[in-house]
């Protein structure tokens, strides 16, 4: 279906209303001045031309089916830019690939991206894992439509169009963090295309999931989209199950000939059982000085099914206003308010040092006598009520100067993030003085998840942390001539954070208040050479910073800020990269890159004084490849590989070791062939050479290769798809926890799912 409309837009930033939401005495004047400065950037000549402009007619139509290939993205530059014009390695997981694999959560989509490993998050669940990208934790570097998504929750794909991974520091446009890169989720949003679709999915482990997607044109100048999801499923990590309810409405409206607005709400409520994985065999049990993988199946669960849980409720409201002054000058403002609630009780399980008979564990101890200690942990039992208010303004100006074509994006970001967290005392015997651990032993080979406990749960401590950001940035994409292009830009960012803990009942401050203000200048520069329309070569350098008070880390307070760290400057990350893109006849695109990513001044403790200082250094370097597109008109492929070498260059301990989470090699491939008559078959493999679970290199997740498959019957109005996962029922592990080798996260065993999709259009 094709409709004609003017789909370029912008707005005046909501300066006064935004500034009023930030109540800090020092923050308010800065924000207000920043907004006015951004408005003032728009050239007066552009404003004068506005009444006489004639906007070009743009067609909005369904995108052509390009298989698994993506040719452009708006995320890396804030303008719709071909990948061949971006000096950065980007993995984009498109909607076609998500559907073909039957992916339902963010971790499913990221299996297609080599160079990523996982660890259990604090109060972890299988879907809420910490990501390691190029050996560096992603933590708070997850975004929705280019805006930071600070919540710790289980991210679902029901309202996600595609997932992007931008490798290397990307602070120019994304701000603090991003040592190894950032993950950006592009949302499904209202447009003028008719869409009425329902999807029902049944699978192994009692998987039951229903989604609906309706997009309707309200008028020639407006559209409404409603997306809903309901899931009630089990899990291979018995008895871990999941309940989900999702709702994502969005409304688009054109205001006049050159302005459009989009308002959206994302709601997701989930209930899971917390899972810190399975306890490994200790060095005492192996006798080798190394931890070893647990000798049990993936479904063995070591928590307390009647007590462990994590409930999340996420609300994200977004208002985007866009205005086009003329064909060369436009402005876009995005305002987002988000709230993340979470209630958690969790259990940590480790192998006991003595066996069932009370004897010390040795390599000769029979496996049947090995025991596990399970602590229902008050340190990881907490409630969250976190908030974020973020405003981003971008001005895009296209012009010619000194014979070069420029696309200049200048912008401003204002944000306030506030984390509220309550910890609890978990006391197994309130009648006895002090706090008694809530604990129960169980067999390693046959754990009992239904053990009954008796304990009191009382609020103990409240932690509050807050961060305010004021940032300005400018990026220029320059076409020097037919063969050469360049991208360069700078970002100035003021980041102020505060943190304290206080007694829950009295309000008396227990630690802090701590405070830190950093002013950081980051940027990137890239040079691109394109000798032909099918070749593109680039080199680039970029950096980013991790402030001491950075929010979004997985901890009780949500920040690293302490009495020690509040005196330390930010850690700096640098990335050096050279890459190439080749477009081949038939629709295949091949990307490659050589990279070196470094944290040049990591926080470490001085071995003599014990004082934390910026003296560490770690490095990950390697080469990456990606091939996407169509080998023939009926044969689509999406594949990638990463070969990495990591080293802790300078440290008090573990110097010379490989950093945790860095696989020497990892790869994935997914391919589908259309047999004719609507039938298609395909599958793929995800593989890793394994990686260390700790910087001490005393335990490693072993190598693995997992094969999946799909078979489908696809018609214009409906689709029936069978997905099979881990066909060989391979036992494998995706990560560990908190730089420790005493527990691991098992991957999914063999499973099947059937998806029925019907379109009412």
Image (tube, helix red, strand yellow):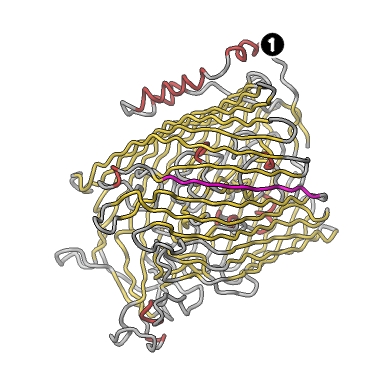
Q: Where is residue 284, by image quadrant?
A: bottom left
Residue at x 66% of width, y 49% of height? 94
Local SS, label 1: helix
Q: Position of residue 306 (x, y in %)?
A: 38, 67
Residue that extends furthest to the left in the rendered view of this protein = 433
Residue 31 falls in image quadrant: top left
Quick check: is 555 in the magenta stretch?
no
Q: Is the magenta stretch mostly helix, strand or loop?
A: strand
* Image quarter of the N terminus: top right
- Residue occupying the point 20% across, 67% down: 429
At 35% from the left edge and 45% from the top edge, which residue is drawn?
548
Q: Where is residue 407 in the image (x, y as percent from the top left)?
A: 64, 28
290 versus 202 height, above or below: below
Q: Residue at x 62, y 26 (%)?
A: 260
Q: On the image, numbered disc 1 is attached to which residue?
A: 52
Stretch of the chain drawn in magenta: 572-584
Q: Determine crowd level at label 1: few under 14, some 14-19, many 20+ residues with C-alpha closer than 10 A.
A: few
| Quadrant of the rendered image containing residue 609 | bottom left
| Left or right of 269 in this view: 101 | right
The reply to whether the magenta stretch includes residue 580 is yes
Task: Using the rendered image of the protein, determine whether residue 468 is visible from the camera's viewpoint.
Answer: no
Residue 466 visible: yes
Please state, as top left, top right, bottom left or bottom right, where the C terminus lies in the image: top right
């Amino acid at each position: 279906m094709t409709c004609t409309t003017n789909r370029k837009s912008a707005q005046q930033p909501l300066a006064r209303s935004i500034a009023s939401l930030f109540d800090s005495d020092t923050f308010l004047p800065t924000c207000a001045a920043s907004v006015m400065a951004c408005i003032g950037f728009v050239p007066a000549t552009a404003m004068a031309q506005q009444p006489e402009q004639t906007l070009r007619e743009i067609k909005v139509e369904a995108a052509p089916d390009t298989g698994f290939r993506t040719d452009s993205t708006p995320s890396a530059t804030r303008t719709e830019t071909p990948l061949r014009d971006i000096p950065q390695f980007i993995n984009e997981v498109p909607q076609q690939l998500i559907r073909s694999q039957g992916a339902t959560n963010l971790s499913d989509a990221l299996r297609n991206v080599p160079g990523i490993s996982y660890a259990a998050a604090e109060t972890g669940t299988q879907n809420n894992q910490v990501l390691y990208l190029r050996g560096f934790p992603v933590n708070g570097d997850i975004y929705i439509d280019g805006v930071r998504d600070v919540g710790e929750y289980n991210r679902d794909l029901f309202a996600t169009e595609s997932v992007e991974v931008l490798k290397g520091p990307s602070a120019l446009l994304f701000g603090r963090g991003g040592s190894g890169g950032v993950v950006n989720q592009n949302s499904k949003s209202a447009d003028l295309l008719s869409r009425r679709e329902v999807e029902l999915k049944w699978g192994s482990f009692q998987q039951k999931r229903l989604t609906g997607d309706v997009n309707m044109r309200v008028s020639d100048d407006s559209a409404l989209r409603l997306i809903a999801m309901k899931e009630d499923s089990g899990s291979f990590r018995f008895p871990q199950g999941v309940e989900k309810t999702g709702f994502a409405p969005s409304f688009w409206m054109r205001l006049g000939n050159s302005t459009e607005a989009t308002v959206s709400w994302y709601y997701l409520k989930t209930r899971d059982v917390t899972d810190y994985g399975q306890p490994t065999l200790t060095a005492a049990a192996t006798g080798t000085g190394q931890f070893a993988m647990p000798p049990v199946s993936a479904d063995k669960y070591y928590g307390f099914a009647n007590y462990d849980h994590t409930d999340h409720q996420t609300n994200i409201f977004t208002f985007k206003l866009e205005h086009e002054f003329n064909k060369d000058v436009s402005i876009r403002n995005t305002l987002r308010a988000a709230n993340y609630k979470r209630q958690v009780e969790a259990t940590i399980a480790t192998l006991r040092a003595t066996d069932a008979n009370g004897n010390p564990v040795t390599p000769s101890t029979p496996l049947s006598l090995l025991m596990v200690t399970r602590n229902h942990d008050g340190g990881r039992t907490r409630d969250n009520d976190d908030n974020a208010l973020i405003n981003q303004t971008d001005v895009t100006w296209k012009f010619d100067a000194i014979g070069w074509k420029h696309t200049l994006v200048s912008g401003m970001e204002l944000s306030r993030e506030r984390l509220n967290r309550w910890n609890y005392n978990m006391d197994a015997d309130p009648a006895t003085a002090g706090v008694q651990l809530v604990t129960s032993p169980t067999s390693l080979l046959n754990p009992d998840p239904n053990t009954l406990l008796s304990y009191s749960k009382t609020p103990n401590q409240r932690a509050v942390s807050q961060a305010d950001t004021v940032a300005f940035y400018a990026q220029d994409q320059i076409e020097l001539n037919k063969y050469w292009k360049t991208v360069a830009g700078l970002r100035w960012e003021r980041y102020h954070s505060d943190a304290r803990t206080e007694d829950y009942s009295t309000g008396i401050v227990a630690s802090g208040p701590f405070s830190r203000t950093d002013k950081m200048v980051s940027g990137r520069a890239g040079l691109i050479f394109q000798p032909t329309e099918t070749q593109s070569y680039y080199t680039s350098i970029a950096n980013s910073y991790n402030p001491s008070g950075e929010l979004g880390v997985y901890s009780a307070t949500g920040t690293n800020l302490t009495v020690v760290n509040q005196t330390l400057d930010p850690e700096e990350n640098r990335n050096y990269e050279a890459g190439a893109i080749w477009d081949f006849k038939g629709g295949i695109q091949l990307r490659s890159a050589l990279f070196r990513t470094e944290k040049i001044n990591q926080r470490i403790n001085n071995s003599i004084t014990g004082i934390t200082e910026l003296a560490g250094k770690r490095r990950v370097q390697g080469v990456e490849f990606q091939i996407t597109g169509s080998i023939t008109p009926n044969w689509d492929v999406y594949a990638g590989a990463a070969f990495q070498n990591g080293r802790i260059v300078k440290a008090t301990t573990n110097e010379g070791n490989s950093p945790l989470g860095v696989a020497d090699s990892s790869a994935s491939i997914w391919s589908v062939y259309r047999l004719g008559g609507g039938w298609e078959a395909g599958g793929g493999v995800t593989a890793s050479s394994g990686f260390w679970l700790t910087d001490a290199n005393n335990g490693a997740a072993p190598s693995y290769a997992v094969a999946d498959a799909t078979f489908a019957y696809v018609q214009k109005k409906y689709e029936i798809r069978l997905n099979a996962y881990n066909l060989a029922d391979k036992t494998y592990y995706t990560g560990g926890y908190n730089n420790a080798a005493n527990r691991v996260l098992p991957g999914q065993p063999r499973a099947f799912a059937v998806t029925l999709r019907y379109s009412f259009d």
